[in-house]
Image (cartoon, rainbow, N blue to C red):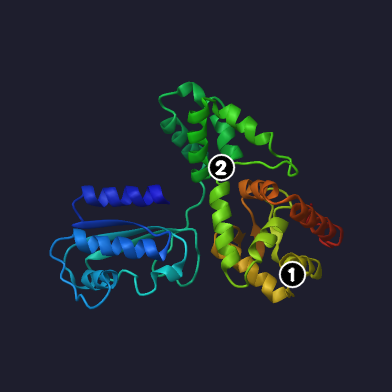
C-alpha cells in the first residue's frame, strides 16, 4: 500500500499537477498532529489564528487555499485519530490514506488491494535481487509459500540479503517451522502482532486474539470456514474461558467484525471467513503452548460435532 501511494504521489509531482505534497506517518494521532504543525512552520505564507492549535489551523488553510495539494496519510491505525483532523474536501486538493482498517467511518472511495499474482511476485523478486541473481533460485516456490503478500516478500528479500542465502533456502527455513508446537518467527509476525493488539482493543475488548487462534486451527489453508461456527456454545464457552468474562453469540460475532475491520480475516457475503495461509501458520506458532492447546481442543470438538463435514481440524 505504501509503495503504491508513493508511486502515485511521485507521478502527480512529476506531472506538475501538485504544488504541495505532504507525506504523514499516520500511525498515531500525535504523529498526525505533529506533521500538520510542522507543515505550518515549513510552508511559507500560511497565516493562522494563533488562538488555536496549529494542526487545526492547517486544516482550515487547506480548505481555503487555491494551491493544488495532496495529503498522504500512511499507515492509519485508528480512524478516530483523524477526529477534527480530516483534510477537507476541496476542488484543488486530495487525500490518500493507506490502512488495513475497513471501518465504515473511513470516508471517500475505498480500494482494497489483493495479494500480488505469481508474475508480479516474481518480477518484484527479480528487481529486488537484481545484483545477486544467484539468490533467485527457488523464487517461484518462495512467492507461493508467502502467499504473494508484498510485505512478506519484502521482509524475505531483506533476510535473504542479510544472511546471504537463496530464495530456496529461505523457503526451506519457513517449511521447517510448520510444526505448530515449535515456536517460530516469520515474515510479518511483528506487524500482525501489532494489528491483533489493535483489534483486541476494539469492543468487545480482548476477543480478537482467541478468535483468531481458533480460526487458525479450523479447516485447511485457503478453505472457507462457516461464520456460524463462531456462535456455537463450544466457541462462546472457549471465549468465556479465554477472557474470563461471559461471552455470548452476539459478542462473538462482534469480535469477528473486529478482525474483519482490521483486515485480519475476510468475511464474505456467503457468511464464511478465510485466513491468509501465512497468517494462519504464524498464529499457530506465535501463541503460547497452553492457549494453542486450548484452541486445538475446541477445533477438534467442532470437527466432531460438525454435521456438514465442512470443518477439518
Res. 284 in view: yes
The residue located at (81%, 66%) in the rendering is 234
Dot 2: few (<14), some (14–19), or many (≥20) neighbours within 10 Å? many
Q: Is residue 224 left or right of residue 155?
A: right
Instruction: Find residue 52 and report its image quarter.
Output: bottom left
Q: Is residue 273 left or right of residue 290?
A: left
Marks 1/2: CA–CA distance: 32 Å
Query: SS of the residue at dot 1?
Result: loop
What secondary structure is marked by label 2? loop
Residue at (77, 67) in percent of width and height: 241
**Which is closer to the viewer, label 1 or label 2?**
1
Q: Out of 9 and 156, give the one closest to the viewer.
A: 156
What residue occupies the far right of the structure in this picture? 304
Residue 144 placement: quadrant: top right
Q: Quadrant of residue 67?
A: bottom left
Taking the view exactly as shown, the residue that stands out farthest to the bottom is: 51
The spot of residue 290 in percent (x, y) is: 77, 53
Give the mark, 1 or 2, whose residue is nearer the N terminus.
2
Residue 298 % position (x, y): 80, 59
Disc number for residue 203: none
**Percent of width and height locating residue 256:** 64, 66
| Residue found 19% across the figure and 76% down from its top | 49
Question: Dot 1 corresponds to which residue?
Answer: 244
Seen in the picture, residue 250 relative to 10 is either above or below; the reply is below
> Does 134 sit above or below residue 286?
above
In the image: residue 26, left or right of residue 197: left
The answer to whether residue 60 is above or below residue 33 is below
Whether residue 310 is visible to the viewer of this picture, yes or no, is no
Category of crowding for the residue at label 1, using alpha-carbon neighbours closer than 10 angstroms: few (below 14), some (14–19), many (at least 20): few
Farthest-out residue, top? 134
Circles 1 and 2 in contact, beta carbons < 8 Å: no
**Residue highlighted by disc 2:** 187
Amino acid at each position: 500500500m505504501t509503495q503504491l501511494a508513493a508511486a502515485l504521489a511521485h507521478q502527480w509531482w512529476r506531472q506538475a499537477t501538485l504544488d504541495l505534497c505532504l507525506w504523514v506517518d499516520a500511525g498515531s494521532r500525535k504523529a498526525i498532529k505533529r506533521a500538520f504543525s510542522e507543515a505550518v512552520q515549513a510552508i511559507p505564507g500560511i497565516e493562522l489564528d494563533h488562538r488555536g492549535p496549529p494542526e487545526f489551523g492547517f486544516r482550515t488553510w487547506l480548505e481555503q487555499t487555491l494551491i493544488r495539494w495532496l495529503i498522504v496519510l500512511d499507515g492509519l491505525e485508528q480512524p478516530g485519530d483523524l477526529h477534527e483532523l480530516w483534510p477537507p474536501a476541496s476542488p484543488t486538493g486530495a487525500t490518500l490514506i493507506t490502512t488495513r482498517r475497513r471501518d465504515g467511518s473511513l470516508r471517500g472511495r475505498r480500494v482494497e488491494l489483493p495479494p500480488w499474482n505469481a508474475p508480479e511476485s516474481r518480477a518484484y523478486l527479480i528487481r529486488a535481487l537484481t545484483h545477486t541473481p544467484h539468490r533467485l533460485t527457488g523464487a517461484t516456490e518462495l512467492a507461493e509459500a508467502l502467499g504473494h503478500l508484498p510485505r512478506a516478500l519484502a521482509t524475505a528479500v531483506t533476510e535473504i540479503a542479510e544472511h546471504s542465502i537463496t530464495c530456496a533456502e529461505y523457503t526451506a527455513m519457513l517449511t521447517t517451522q510448520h510444526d505448530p508446537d515449535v515456536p517460530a518467527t516469520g515474515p510479518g509476525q511483528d506487524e500482525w502482532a501489532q494489528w491483533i493488539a489493535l483489534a483486541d482493543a476494539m469492543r468487545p475488548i480482548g476477543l480478537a486474539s482467541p478468535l483468531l487462534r481458533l480460526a487458525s486451527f479450523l479447516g485447511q489453508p485457503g478453505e472457507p470456514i462457516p461464520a456460524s461456527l463462531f456462535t456455537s456454545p463450544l466457541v462462546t464457552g472457549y471465549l468465556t474461558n479465554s477472557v474470563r468474562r461471559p461471552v455470548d453469540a452476539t459478542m462473538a460475532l462482534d469480535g469477528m467484525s473486529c478482525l474483519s475491520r482490521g483486515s485480519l480475516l475476510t468475511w464474505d457475503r456467503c457468511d464464511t471467513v478465510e485466513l491468509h495461509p501465512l497468517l494462519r501458520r504464524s498464529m499457530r506458532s506465535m501463541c503460547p503452548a497452553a492457549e494453542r492447546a486450548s484452541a486445538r481442543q475446541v477445533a477438534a470438538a467442532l470437527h466432531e460435532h460438525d454435521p456438514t463435514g465442512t470443518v477439518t481440524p
